[in-house]
Image (cartoon, rainbow, N blue to C red):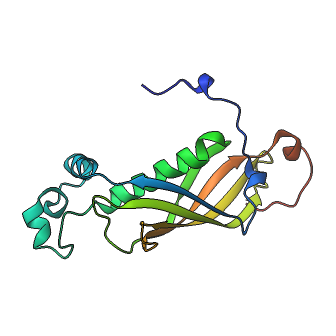
Amino acid sequence: MSPSPSSHPEPRLYWEDFPAGQVREFGGLEVTRDAVLAFARDFDPQPFHLDDAAAESSLFGRLAASGWHTCALAMRMMCDAYLNQSASLGSPGVENLKWVKPVYPGDRLWVRLTILEARPMASRPGVGLVKSHWDVKNQHGEIVLTMDGWGIFARRPAAATTASPAVD
C-alpha cells in the first residue's frame, strides 16, 4: 500500500531547480532475471522475454528485458533520485523514445538526464515546464534507451508571485 499524500514531506525541489543545461546522473539499478520474467508475464509476454530457448533463436541471442520494462526501471530511478522529493505535477508525455540496445538480466542501469528547456507557463504562474533528455546506460556505458520528455513542476511559492516572461 502506498503512503497517503499527506505523509509525503514538503518538496525540496521546484521548477527553479531544473535550469536548461543542467545534467544529473543517478541510478545503479540491477536488472534481475526474476524481474525480467515477472514483467514479461504481466505486460509483454513475447517468447524472447519469457523463454531461454526462444530468446536464443531471436535477434537478442538470450533472454532480454522488455523495452517497456526498461522504461519502467528508468522511471523508478527518476523517482528515487529526485521526483519523489520534488514538486512534480506529472507529465504531458515523452517524445523520441528509442530502445537502442537490449537489456539483459545482470545488467546495471543508470540514467544521465539533461535539461533541454525550462519555462514558466503564462496561463498558470505557479507552474513551470521542463523538457529533458534521458540516456539510460548499462554498466559498460552503452546507451540502451533514449527519450525526451516533459515534466510539469510547481514553482517556488515566492517565485510564482513575481512577474517573469512566460509562454504556453
In the displayed structure, 14 sits above or below 66; it is above
* Residue furthest left as drawn: 53
| Quadrant where the N terminus is found in the figure | top left
* Residue furthest right as drawn: 162
In the displayed structure, 9 sits above or below 99; it is above
Q: Is residue 121 left or right of residue 6?
A: right
Q: Quadrant of residue 105?
A: bottom left
Write the residue at 89% across / 57% down.
164
| Image location (x, y in percent) of residue 114 | 63, 67
Q: Is residue 25 left or right of residue 63?
A: right
Q: Quadrant of residue 60?
A: bottom left
Write the residue at 64% across / 44% down.
88
Across the whole image, how many numbered discs are drawn on residues?
Answer: 0
| Image location (x, y in percent) of residue 152 | 65, 51
Front residue (pair 3, 55): 55
Front residue (pair 151, 103): 103
Front residue (pair 168, 129): 129
Write the residue at 83% across / 39% down.
157
In the displayed structure, 49 sits above or below 35; it is below
Q: Quadrant of residue 149?
A: bottom right
| Quadrant where the C terminus is found in the figure | bottom right
Write the residue at 66% across / 43% down.
86
Q: Is residue 53 left or right of residue 80?
A: left
| Image location (x, y in percent) of residue 39 | 27, 49
